Image (tube, rainbow, N blue to C red):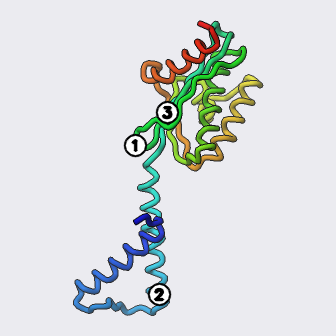
Amino acid sequence: MNLTPEKLAEKIVHHIWAELGVMSGLGDLKFNISRQKRAENLKQWETDISQIIRGANGYKKYLGYFDGSAKPNPGDMSIGGYILSPSGRKVYSYSISLGHGSNNVAEYRSLIHLLRECQARGIQRILIRGDSQLVINQVTDTWQCKDPYMSELCEETKALISGIESCTFKWEPRKNNKEADKLTKLGHLLNGGV
């Protein structure tokens, strides 16, 4: 049975109310309150419980990894990354060769690509990991973005993030981002590059 959080909360509240009545020996539990107040209390309980249920479901996030590089720097750019479902199944991966640019531009382009894929797939809760401190710290407003072109990429990224219900970031050391790095290198190979 697939219940919405609201319907599940309603069932829980009515079950609790009935159990309270059984425990009290009164059958249908009666408090010294009006019907309207009872209905208001039950509705409030349903709202509170549905928020708890939604919160519990909210811990089920997708996981995304991104990487980008330029060879040499600046040079031919390549991006790579992937998305894992909450159960750990890979739902998408990419290795793409791009034009000329810097490592930082490639990192931004990779994150933008990943976010677009999230939107295309209806992913609304994701933790994104990457080894670019610059990109992660700029999109989370930890660091300022002074370069005009990088600022444009940062704003484009933030616009995509705003279309996702919950999008959080975690910086990972390069050694923990190996698979995205391999996918990025594959992008260089697809271009006949390094």
> Mark 3 or 1, which is nearer the eye?
1
Foreground residue, 172 or 62? 62
Separation (CA) of disc 2 from disc 3 = 46 Å
Separation (CA) of disc 3 from disc 1 = 19 Å
Q: Is residue 141 above or below residue 174?
A: below
Residue at left offset 47%, top offset 63%: 51
Q: Is residue 17 left or right of residue 39?
A: left
What x and y, as percent, mark residue 129? 50, 31
Q: Secondary structure at mark 3?
A: strand
Separation (CA) of disc 2 from disc 1 = 43 Å
Which picture quadrant has residue 15? bottom left
The residue at the far right in this view is: 148
Q: Amino acid at mark 2?
A: Lys
**Pointer 2: residues within 10 angstroms few (<14), some, or many (20+)?**
few
Q: Give the residue pinned by disc 3.
A: 170
Q: Amino acid at mark 1?
A: Ser
**Pointer 1: residues within 10 angstroms few (<14), some, or many (20+)?**
few
Foreground residue, 130 or 133? 130
Q: Secondary structure at mark 2?
A: helix
Q: Is residue 22 above or below residue 87?
A: below
Q: Amino acid at mark 3?
A: Lys
> Mark 2 or 3, which is nearer the eye?
3
Foreground residue, 9 or 194? 194
Residue at left offset 41%, top offset 91%: 33
Q: Which mark is residue 37?
A: 2
Residue at left offset 43%, top offset 64%: 2
What x and y, as percent, mark residue 103? 63, 16
Q: Earlier in the sequence, mark 2 or mark 1?
A: 2
Q: Is residue 16 left or right of residue 33?
A: left
Which picture quadrant has residue 95? top right
Q: Give the residue pinned by disc 1.
A: 87
Q: Quadrant of the N terminus?
A: bottom left
